[in-house]
Image: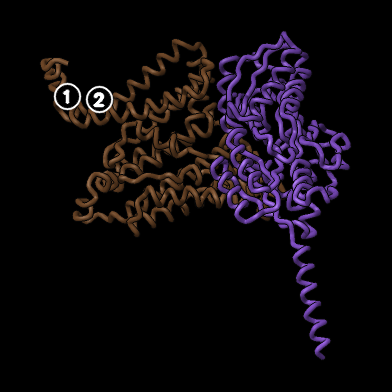
Amino acid sequence: MSSAENNTASSWLNSDRRKLILQEYGIFLAFLLLVGILALSNEFFLTPGNISNVLLQTSINGILAIGMTFVILTRGIDLSVGSVVALAGMVSASFVTSSATAGIAGAPYPMVVALAVGILVGVACGGLVGFIVSRFSVPAFVATLGMLSAARGATLIYGGGKPVPGLSPEFRWIGTGNILGIPMPVILLALVFGISWWVLTRTRFGRYIYAVGGNPHAAKTSGLNVTRIRFMVYVISGALSGLAGMILSARTGSALPQAGIAYELDAIAAVVIGGTSLSGGVGRVTGTLIGALIIGVMNNGLDLMGIQSYYQQVLKGALIVGAVMLDQKRNQGL
Amino acid sequence: MKKLMIALASATVLLASSALAQEKLKIGAAPYGLNAEFMQIWSAALEEHPAVKSGEVELTVFDGRYDALVQQEQFNTMITQKFNAIIFVPIDIEAGATAVQAASDAGIPVVGSNTRVNSDLLASYVGSDDTISGYMEAKAVLDKIGCKGNVVIIEGPIGQSAQISRLEGNQKALAECPDVKVLEQQTANWSRAEAQTLMENWLTAHPGQINGVIGQNDEMALGAVEAIKSAGLKTEDFAIAGIDGITDALTAVKEGTITSILQDARAQAQGALDLAIFHAKKGDYKPQSDIWAQYPDMPFNDGKDKEYNVPWTPVTSDNVDKLLDMRK
């Protein structure tokens, strides 16, 4: 690039506002480009049925990635989401199964009970991690790595390593039902997104999260309760993992002990592709949603074209690294 | 009094030496991993073997955690602790050979079970031939669609011995129906959730064209069932088959949604344990499990065979209730 071009580029990008717009819409443009390419190469891609499929297939990762965004914004990381998905899915399933051997006494209970239990399991796991990270200053990587192992083990202990089948139709509705033709998991994702967007952009708590991630020391000296905010983001991530776990078991019809393995990696990938910085304080939940959609659209498109899933993994890897490279460039002012 | 003392002392010595002769056989079982239902049924069957229940054999089960290196280290542990025999279910057909070599060097007999290892040092092997199940399930699907139409194949992790052999069986059955077209063929890594996503996308890519689904295991066949249901289609309009006979699949067979081919984990486990004891005792042993009576086509044959093939059982509406009862 010649220096003249460079100058025009930087003058165009002079105001922070413009830079922000590019940051926000850059990922959106990439998403539209991907959709365009896939729409041209496959006739079924833009059919209503397939759009519904993509959204459905994105919903679980989307919900996990939104929880992950909260954590990463405070410079943390949550490696335990996949295991918490399995644990919450299994424990809640044991409340709504019709199987005599896999359920707890008195099952099946109403769906609401299972939902509350599943969220509580997530909150408990997240709360424990949050407590350890915020009170004992254990690095999030270590604390959540511990939870990744412990929650998986707890899942195997709780279910005796066996799946919990025969979930009540009422419970399965959250995974397979729809309202006005929109699948329930997609509605739940939209709700989670809406609330998270509001919390992060419109509330004091949201601003505090950015403050803690941007500069924890300054946040502390300006009187913020950093410990509490750090604690809360893991509780949020845990609760959303619990929700995702229930959607997963409701979709597959049976809670499986090996469910959710490596889900944390796709969630982190969505956050990173969406432009949230791993060093905290910078990022948007909108970007995360688009990041999750990019992964979902890519997997779906390649399946439609009959391309081996191994290529999907290579492409995803390139996308993650590419997104961060762009991000770094942007941070250096291009 | 002195005589009495001597008598007592010699009695003690005698007792001690006879106790030594009666020492329990230490047998280790090394399955590749205990997270999935099949291997749980397998290891539970070992614990229920008559020789373990009577205390004749002291059994230790090691969880291989789906890692070839972990399994190899467990072999080293068993060798140092001087186990009398090892039952081995390797995660990988090639990587397992090193472990078998080490045990063989230490003079410990190794009996294979369920999955294969590329080694001629195994004392014996008790398993089921996956090409046969692959053939049986594909045949069930093809028979149901009348040997014409389109099918999709959902495969196990590419390169695993079960995936290779089951595909070979699938293809053998498909070759008998040249009019049948394979629309798609991809891996879902034995996972129900992955198969569900795959099938959802295939139903979109080939609307109204898929007649049969060949799932190389039950989990994936069940994932396809969920995808069909969530697309608002009827499972009756599809011929779907899986392999293994896991509990959820038995329930689905009962409901008439899929066909499954049962792999008898109990027979593979107890058969392997009988052979392990036989080789540990250098042939001075009669098998105790009832599985030999259950499968007259697989005689014990004085422990001489290198390979025992446990027959596959198609799960039908006739035997499904009995099988479900056994799982309780």
Name which residue lies at 76% across and 38% down.
Answer: B264
Numbered label attached to residue A22: 2
Q: Is residue A91 visible?
A: no
x, y percent for residue B300: 84, 41
Chain name for mark 2: A
* Image height of A267 relative to A157, above or below: above
Report which colour depicts chain B. Answer: purple
Tell which of A268 and A99 is nearer to you: A268
Tell which of B263 and A202 is nearer to you: B263
Q: Is residue A219 visible?
A: yes
Q: Which residue is mark 1?
A: A13
* Image height of A187 relative to B284, above or below: above
x, y percent for residue A203: 30, 45
x, y percent for residue B120: 68, 34
Q: Are marks 1 and 2 in contact (CB under 8 Å)?
A: yes
Chain name for mark 1: A
Name which residue lies at 68% across and 41% down.
Answer: B38
Q: CA distance from mark 1 to mark 2?
A: 9 Å
Report which colour depicts chain A. Answer: brown
Tell which of A229 and A306 is nearer to you: A306
Quadrant for the N terminus of chain B in the image: bottom right
x, y percent for residue A109: 64, 50
Indicate left or right for A215 with A82 as reference.
Answer: left
Name which residue lies at 43% across and 56% down.
Answer: A128
